[in-house]
Image (tube, grey):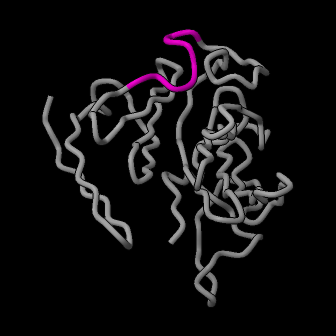
Amino acid sequence: WRSHFVSVGSVSETHHVIMEDWRQHTGFTGFSLTGSHAYFCSGHRHQVYSLDMETKCIRPLIGQVEVPGCSDSKRPSEQLLRNPTDTAVFSRRLFIADAGNQRVLCFDRKKNECQVVFEGMEPRHIAAYHSGLFVYDHGQHKIFHVTMDTWEVRHVLGTGISGILFDSEEGLPPLSTNLRTITSMTIY
């Protein structure tokens, strides 16, 4: 396994994390960072992991190792995932694109509870910010916005037909745009 040096910057500080090339060997995807932790998915193991950047300890956070499934439990230790593909973090909330179960979960790290905040066909990629969450649903070829306070879901991009993405004059594609496969999302 090759080692990689990953540098992720923020306004106040830069975090340096030494990580193995796990994606090639284990299928880890969907990385997101806070000031003290990195979160990532292992789709084939059906789990989300947490890396404590100070202690360098990795621990399973949500899901049962190699046990795919779906559960309604609010407790993260009892939650079952099926092929999680992405994570996004904002404040105390960790969002998980649980593509195989056709949903996005919100794990409130302070309350230690999970809840479903989006149900679709195949949510693969997510990006969170202070007032919302964007969800790319590959099964629908659409991007949705989920409001943080009410969990209201609104379609914001894509016709539902796979196609070529063309930019509008304003720099953003219109709702009438056909989306092909989106490989990642971020909010800047």
Please name whichever residue, 141 or 80, is drawn nearer the observer in this view of the structure.
Answer: 80
On screen, 81 above or below 142? above
The residue at the point 70 percent across, 41 percent down is 139
Range shown magenta = 59-67
Name the residue nearer the viewer: 161 or 102.
102
Name the residue located 59 percent from the left edge and 64 percent from the top edge: 164
Name the spot of residue 103 as percent of width and height, x first: 72, 35
The outermost residue toward the bottom is 169
Q: Is residue 168 left or right of residue 59?
A: right
Q: Position of residue 159 (x, y in %)?
A: 77, 61
Q: In x, y percent, where is residue 60?
A: 46, 22
Question: Looking at the image, is 119 positioned above or below residue 12?
Answer: above
Asked if the magenta segment contains residue 131, the reply would be no
> Total marks drawn?
0
| Front residue of 40 and 74 | 74
Give the position of the N terminus as an image quadrant. top left
Where residue 131 sits, quadrant-wise, is: bottom right
Residue at 47 percent across and 32 percent down: it is 41
In the image, is 60 to the left or to the right of 13?
A: right
Percent of width and height locating residue 134: 67, 58
Rendered position, 165 above or below 70: below
Q: Residue at x 72, y 75 (%)?
A: 174
